[in-house]
Image (cartoon, grey):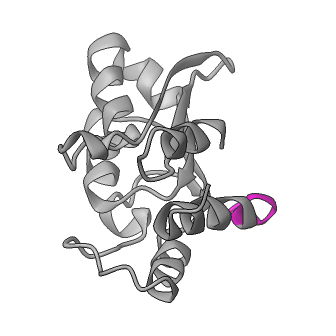
Amino acid sequence: MELAAEALEKGDEPFGSVLVSAGGEVLAEGHNEVASGDQTRHPEFELARWSATHLTPEERAGATVYTSGEHCPMCAAAHAWVGLGRIVYAASSQQLSAWLSELGVPPSPVRTLPVHEVAPGVTVEGPAAELTDQVHALHRRFHQKQP
């Protein structure tokens, strides 16, 4: 959640992710950077790319990605292609779509799909009910341009 807030503070959409080893060590982290002009600069995609060059297949399979929002189809595919393990997310794509619709945000150019429809072999946990209000507030702040 801190990384999502950091993205928001930098003028980007509030998404943040952490890659954790099977032993609980934080391996890498990132936040959204699509404000750079590259719409593929999602933290989940960046972590998948990082893991492909820095971890063995076994290490990737044992790792977990903790993220503020459920992976989009692009990120879910990257996650599966590099063989990362479990995904734990705070808010679902369905929740995010509903929130953005309520705020009058135009729909994404890519269809929103649950991770299990894109990457059926990946273990997915979420949403985390105790964090969804916080995620919702971050997105509301971004799209309503509140301080």
Residue 85 x, y percent position in the rendering? 48, 38
In-front residue for pair 9/84 = 9
Query: How many discs appear?
Result: 0
**Residue 48 found in image quarter:** top left
Residue furthest right in the image: 130
The answer to whether residue 65 is seen in the rendering is: yes
Residue 12 x, y percent position in the rendering? 41, 47
Q: Quadrant of the N terminus?
A: top right
The answer to whether residue 126 is seen in the rendering is: no
Q: Horizontal placement of 114 versus 102: left or right?
A: left
Q: Is residue 47 magenta?
A: no
Q: Horizontal placement of 146 versus 81: left or right?
A: right
Please identify the dominant SS of the magenta region.
Answer: helix
Q: Is residue 131 magenta?
A: yes
In-front residue for pair 100/17 = 100
Residue that appears at 42% across and 25% down: 60
User: Which stretch is magenta?
Assistant: 127-132
Q: Horizontal placement of 100 versus 1: left or right?
A: left
Residue that appears at 52% across and 70% down: 144
Residue 81 x, y percent position in the rendering? 25, 41
**Residue 95 found in image quarter:** bottom right
Q: Quadrant of the C terminus?
A: bottom right
Q: Horizontal placement of 135 versus 40: left or right?
A: right
Residue that appears at 36% across and 73% down: 113
Residue 134 x, y percent position in the rendering? 72, 59
Q: Is residue 111 above or below residue 13?
A: below
Q: Is residue 135 above or below residue 99?
A: above
